[in-house]
Image (tube, rainbow, N blue to C red):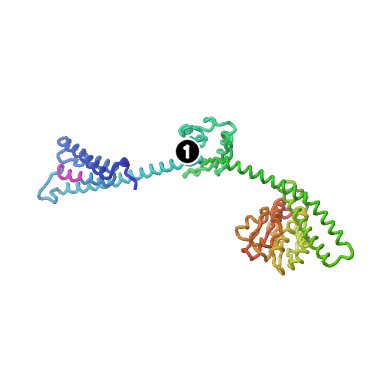
């Protein structure tokens, strides 16, 4: 419960005592005016202010008590009495007594509500000030001249200056370095001009800070009247981000080195297998063993190639030669590259596209690699005897290719991360034999061509559908 204004430290009964004391003052003042005022005039003259003070300072209860005592005192001492009349008052005096009594009660209610609303506003302001002062973030508000209208207490912990030292001053007037002032003023000007939030990051006193500037609008005109800034110390976050970026670069270098070093041994193994397969008089077990070795060597060659391509893309070193090519021919070539895998798993691959040519601008070899990876992925996760469909369709200024399978499916929460490097969906993990880079390579290659890739799935065990959208030639 919120205490009345001025009575926060009083016990409830002390408020009533104070109300009685105010009434006594009003009654004494009215008695002192006897002879000065007309004999039958102004019976409530001095009671009005004391009742109003009691209600405002001590609450509705003491105010009503003071009003009741005032009515009683006026009735007894300052109204002429007629024994033959109702309540011993003439009709006019009775009406005046009732009227003034009502006015006192209404005054008590109004002043009590006024005091209560001011107390609520003061309490909310105090709570807001306490929250902002205890927040580790620095809250600021700027006017159109970039002067501080408000600053939270966190600024004092950072700079050692009281918040009052900032009010009405710009960053330049407060001694902020010129380069930093220019950065702040440019960002503030952008918020005022464009009426949209702006973020900035800066260094101050060997610490890194991130600020979000948000426009505040005038309700009548709709114009930006001020800008609210929320500044947070992100020194530790920035340090960890830099460490992660450094580790990421080291990882890419390691993967590129490993992939490069594996190429020569794999090439030697592949050549040796090819020589052995041409030797006469090989037994069936030998031929089967060499066949298995050849398939695994081809798989390793493909994985190493994908890994090297991925590291080149991330380092912006991948060479792309673009030309106008027929999308349908690329799809046919991708199906041919997966022919052996589809036969091994007895998976049927169906192709669908419109009759008219579908031209795109891109690197034919890399786009075949994109569709080949998607087909390989779909075949690998399809059950034996399953069906994989690759369909092309026109969608305005884009051409879209969809690869649909009936395999392991993808969990809903994995759809947004399945194209990240080394991510493998749990639903098909038992069937996975790769490194989880095929889809990551697809995403990067499609984006290099100005396209977009995404996946959908009804859930584990219910298949998946991958979409590649590329700009149509001449768009």
Q: Is residue 358 above or below residue 101?
A: below
Q: Is residue 70 magenta?
A: yes
Residue picked out by circle 1: 152
Viewer can see residue 103: no
Depth check, front residue: 263 or 456: 263
153 relative position to 367: left or right: left
Relative height, residue 354 to residue 361 (above, below): below
Q: Which residue in the rendered view is the most extreme toward the bottom?
A: 385
Residue 453 lies left or right of residue 74; in this view the side is: right
Query: Where does the magenta region start and end?
Result: 69-77
**Residue 89: x %, y % from top left:** 14, 48
Does residue 217 appear left or right of residue 356 in this picture?
left
Can residue 87 be seen by looking at this rendering?
yes
Q: Main structural element of the magenta stretch: helix, strand or loop?
A: helix
Position of 228 compared to 469: left or right? left
* Location of residue 299 in the rendering, given as x and y in whole percent from the top left corner: 76, 58
User: Does residue 167 belong to the magenta stretch?
Assistant: no
Quarter of the view holding residue 465: bottom right
Q: Position of residue 176 (x, y in %)?
A: 55, 31
Mark 1, other Cα within 10 Å: few <14 / some 14–19 / many ≥20: many
Question: Residue 272 lies in what quarter of the image?
Answer: bottom right
Label 1: element kind: loop
Front in this rendered view, residue 291 or 381: 291
On the image, the x and y values in percent for residue 446 come to 71, 53
For the point 17% across and 46% down, the residue is 93
Q: Is residue 445 above or below residue 393?
A: above
Residue at 82% from the left image edge and 56% from the top image edge: 269
- Residue ID at (32%, 44%): 3
Which residue is found at the position 16% from the left and 49% from the top? 91
């Amino acid at each position: 419960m919120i205490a009345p204004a001025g009575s926060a430290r009083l016990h409830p009964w002390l408020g009533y005592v104070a109300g009685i004391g105010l009434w006594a003052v009003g009654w004494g003042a009215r008695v002192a005016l006897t002879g000065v005022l007309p004999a039958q005039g102004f019976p409530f003259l001095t009671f009005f202010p004391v009742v109003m003070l009691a209600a405002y300072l001590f609450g509705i209860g003491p105010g009503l008590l003071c009003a009741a005592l005032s009515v009683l005192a006026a009735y007894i001492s300052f109204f002429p009495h007629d024994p033959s009349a109702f309540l011993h008052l003439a009709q006019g005096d009775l009406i005046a007594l009732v009227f003034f009594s009502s006015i006192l009660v209404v005054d008590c209610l109004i002043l009590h509500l006024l005091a209560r609303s001011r107390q609520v506003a003061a309490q909310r302001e105090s709570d807001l000030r306490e929250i902002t002062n205890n927040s580790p973030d620095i809250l600021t508000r700027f006017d159109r001249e970039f002067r501080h209208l408000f600053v939270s207490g966190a600024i004092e912990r950072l700079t050692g200056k009281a918040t009052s030292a900032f009010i009405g001053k710009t960053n330049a007037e407060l001694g902020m370095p010129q380069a930093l002032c220019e950065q702040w003023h440019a960002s503030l000007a952008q918020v005022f001009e464009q009426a949209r939030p702006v973020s900035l990051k800066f260094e101050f006193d060997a610490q890194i800070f991130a600020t979000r500037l948000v426009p505040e609008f005038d309700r009548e005109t709709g114009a930006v009247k001020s800008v609210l800034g929320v500044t947070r110390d992100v020194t530790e976050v920035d340090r960890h981000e830099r460490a992660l970026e450094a580790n990421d670069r080291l990882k890419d270098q390691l993967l590129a080195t490993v992939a490069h070093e594996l190429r020569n041994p794999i090439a030697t193994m592949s050549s040796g297998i090819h020589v052995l397969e041409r030797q006469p008089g090989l037994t069936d077990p030998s031929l089967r063993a060499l066949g298995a070795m050849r398939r695994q060597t081809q798989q390793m060659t493909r994985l190493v190639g994908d890994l090297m391509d991925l590291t080149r893309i991330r380092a912006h070193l991948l060479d792309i030669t673009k030309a106008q090519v027929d999308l349908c021919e690329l799809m046919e070539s991708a199906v041919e590259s997966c022919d052996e895998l589809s036969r091994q798993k007895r998976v049927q691959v169906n192709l669908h596209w419109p009759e008219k040519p579908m031209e795109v601008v891109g690197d034919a070899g890399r786009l075949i690699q994109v569709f080949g990876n998607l087909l390989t992925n779909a075949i690998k996760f399809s059950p034996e005897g399953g069906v994989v469909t690759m369909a092309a369709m026109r969608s305005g200024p884009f051409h879209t290719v969809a690869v649909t399978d009936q395999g392991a499916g993808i969990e809903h929460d994995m759809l947004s991360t399945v194209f990240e490097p080394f991510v493998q969906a749990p639903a098909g993990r038992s069937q996975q034999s790769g490194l989880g880079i095929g889809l990551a390579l697809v995403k990067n290659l499609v984006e290099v061509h100005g396209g977009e890739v995404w996946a959908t799935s009804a859930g584990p065990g219910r298949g998946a559908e991958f979409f590649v959208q590329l700009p149509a030639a001449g768009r």
